[in-house]
Image (cartoon, rainbow, N blue to C red):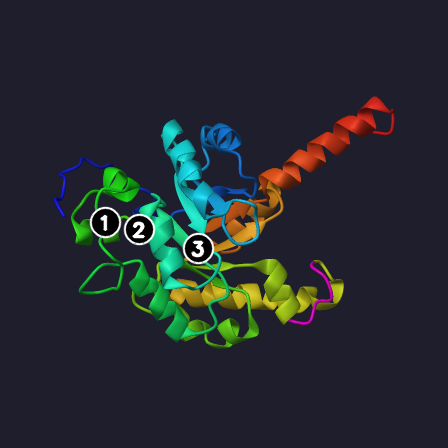
Amino acid sequence: MTTVSVSHPDPGFAARLRRREPLVGYWISLDSPVAVERIAGLGYDYVGVDGQHGVVHQPGWQAAMLAVDARGRSAGVIRVPSPDPVAVGVALDAGARGVIVPMVEDAGQARAVARACRHHPVGTRSLGGPVRAELRMGSVPAEVDDRVACIVMIETASALSDLDAICATEGVDAVYVGPADLSAALGARWFGDPAAAGALEAALRTVTGTARRHGIACGIHVPDGDGAAKRLAEGFTFATVSSDITHLQQAAAAHLAAARGLA
């Protein structure tokens, strides 16, 4: 296979993440590149595309990354469906600047996905050749590896109990809390169940403290901008705000209430 020399931007998102800079992102659940392009021009540090629970399935990942890149302001990140290394490689070949990997249970899984983000000799990622990743991040494997962020989710009791080892895993750039699943793991009957609120907050302090001790970034999903500011002040280094589908429903409901004099 012939390699093409391609210009690329500075390391950007991955470098900022590793420096533990405060970053704010937005969440995309809908398969609409037009909407993604609008959001990507607002100034969020990154736009996270949900390939696990949203309706953006694998054929839509590349279109979403194209839409993000079209505005030149945000980094495109994809949450893959599972810790499957194949899914990680597909997302990165689509041009994602990072992957968020759900349901990582322990340091062994964390190591496997971290290696899936990197090429030989430190990883297992296959050379992609002339795909979108090469256009955005270059064709030298080690340099591409530097521009990619590996973010693993902490959302199960097993992950919480192995948190120290996960954070110490070579190649893991950040941990990311899924508060809904972590709440369920801590005994919540639904997300927001007050019976588990204290346990969740204690777990969040453990996550931020452990990540800080190991010098890696630490993120969380939040319902709104105020929630992002709160969590960043508490020690998280990045926060992802709500989702397009949630905001679409909220806006439509508010307008309906206003039109009927119910607001």
- Counting from the top left corner in percent of width and height, residue 173 is at 35, 58
State the image quarter where residue 210 is shown.
bottom left
Q: Which residue in the structure is indicated by mark 2?
A: 148
- Residue 11 seen anywhere in this rendered image of the structure: no
* Span highlighted in magenta in the image: 186-191
User: Three-letter amino acid code at disc 3?
Assistant: Ile
Q: Residue at x 59, y 65 (%)?
A: 182
Q: Tell me whether circle 2 and circle 1 mark residues in contact (CB < 8 Å).
A: yes
Looking at the picture, does residue 177 appear above or below residue 227? below
User: Three-letter amino acid code at disc 1?
Assistant: Val
How many angstroms separate mark 2 from mark 1 (CA)? 7 Å
* Residue 187 magenta-highlighted: yes
Q: Secondary structure at mark 1?
A: helix
**Residue at the right extreme?**
261
User: Which quadrant does the C terminus fall into?
Assistant: top right
How many angstroms separate mark 3 from mark 2 (CA)? 11 Å
User: In the visual, does 87 lie left or right of 154?
Assistant: left
Q: Which residue in the structure is indicated by mark 3?
A: 100
- Counting from the top left corner in percent of width and height, residue 247 is at 64, 37
Which circle marks residue 204 in the picture? none
Q: Secondary structure at mark 3?
A: strand
Nearer to me, 203 or 14: 14
* Residue 241 magenta-highlighted: no
- Counting from the top left corner in percent of width and height, residue 146 is at 24, 52
Q: Which residue in the structure is indicated by mark 1?
A: 144
State the image quarter where residue 163 is shown.
bottom left
Nearer to me, 187 or 230: 187
